[in-house]
Image (spheres, coloured by chain):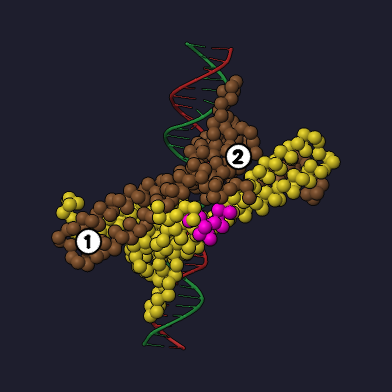
Chain colours: A brown, B yellow, C green, D red
Amino acid sequence: MSKATERPDVKIEEAKDKVIGAIAETMDLYGVTPAAANLYATMYFEDQMTLDEMRTELGMSKPSMSTSVRRLQEIDMVKKTYTRGSRKHTYTAEKNFFRSFMAFYCQMWEREVKINLDAIREAQEDFIEVIKDSHSTPEIVAKAKKYYDQLEESKTYYHWLDDLVENIRSGKIFEFLPKEK
Amino acid sequence: MSKATERPDVKIEEAKDKVIGAIAETMDLYGVTPAAANLYATMYFEDQMTLDEMRTELGMSKPSMSTSVRRLQEIDMVKKTYTRGSRKHTYTAEKNFFRSFMAFYCQMWEREVKINLDAIREAQEDFIEVIKDSHSTPEIVAKAKKYYDQLEESKTYYHWLDDLVENIRSGKIFEFLPKEK
DNA sequence: AAGAACGTTAAATAAATTCTGAACGAAATT
DNA sequence: AATTTCGTTCAGAATTTATTTAACGTTCTT
């Protein structure tokens, strides 16, 4: 069976599937399950979907769709939409990849900054105590100083990352890197 | 047993462990296994390590260290170092987080751009064929046009991402976002 | 108020990853 | 050449993660 003689409606679905496959494949970077990745990619071509539509479209269980769509909402790649009349919840995919990018990475990077800076602050306090401790041998003090400085140095990176997040959130990044070339 | 009366050398190890825990925790974002994350975080405080040192330090098997260190090399977070005299391979962790950041994200984003742009190109060709196909009904043609335009629109994002990668690789990003504030 | 429609939770099953022990191969030492 | 050292590959075990079936609670409909 040759592709050239294929019915147009079938050909459309196959073309969509190529893109759906690519999006889903690269979404592992976003730390979502395959089900969630496939779901988002499928929704990318749909206006809005209900849980039941998702289930029939992807051939998966309803709880699976329920948890997947919740995860996608957490990273702001899917929004719940109000549809009057219908009792079923409807959801739409964020189709603007710039917004998906911004929402996801800002969230993740902020988490990275917070967790690491908190740990660094605690550790640096400990190192200072060791340095001031009269029981510490000169070797121990030297070691503590070395680690303290290494952490101090690394803070530059986390502050930079924080700055990056801010510039992405505010849209200022697009002054430097315009969307259109 | 109170922390205040703790021996300095023990206190140093505990302080290090706080940071090791934080780094390892946030490294899930980098798509590495827990073993690899722990290994990198441990190596962050070491000059260089051999496989056997890793094994004893983390209390894991040698094959596990071998695969972990290979994965870390793939994303340029660990480099193999030549140590004369020793037959054992030695490895050092990339301690400059800017370089880790750049290497990892540029690699991942380039992959995302390539996979998706390839799929988009193929799909757009298909949509054009459908549009030109005399067997296509007006509804089918309209649908194909809609999808074609949606993909065309999304290409802006991938080109921007490609541009971002380029500016990170070249270091030009730091003209806009300096490392030191 | 009873019943149906929805979505979620919980427990279980299934699937995929990760890790280990054993065997292997290459390189160096004796 | 034989033996040891070192790193990797491979097959299986163990753990974790993802998914499903079944039951539950809520809200709407009649």
Residue highlighted by disc 1? B9
Tell me the SS state at disc 1: helix
Tell me the SS state at disc 2: loop
State whether residue B164 is above or below residue A67: below
Q: Which residue is drawn at 75% across and 36% down?
A: B142
Check if residue B144 falls in the magenta segment.
no
Tell me the distance, in whole angstroms, between the alpha carbons under discs 1 and 2.
54 Å
Q: Where is residue A55 in the image (x, y as percent from the top left)?
A: 59, 35
The amino acid type, in three-letter code, at marker 2 is: Lys
Check if residue B169 falls in the magenta segment.
yes
Q: Give the range drawn in magenta.
A: B163-174
Q: Residue at x 28, y 54 (%)?
A: A124
Residue highlighted by disc 2? A95
Q: Residue at x 59, y 22 (%)?
A: A84
Q: Nearer the observer, disc 1 or disc 2?
A: 2
Q: Position of residue D18 (x, y in %)?
A: 51, 44
Task: Depth check: give the residue in front, A39 or B84.
Answer: B84
The amino acid type, in three-letter code, at marker 1 is: Asp
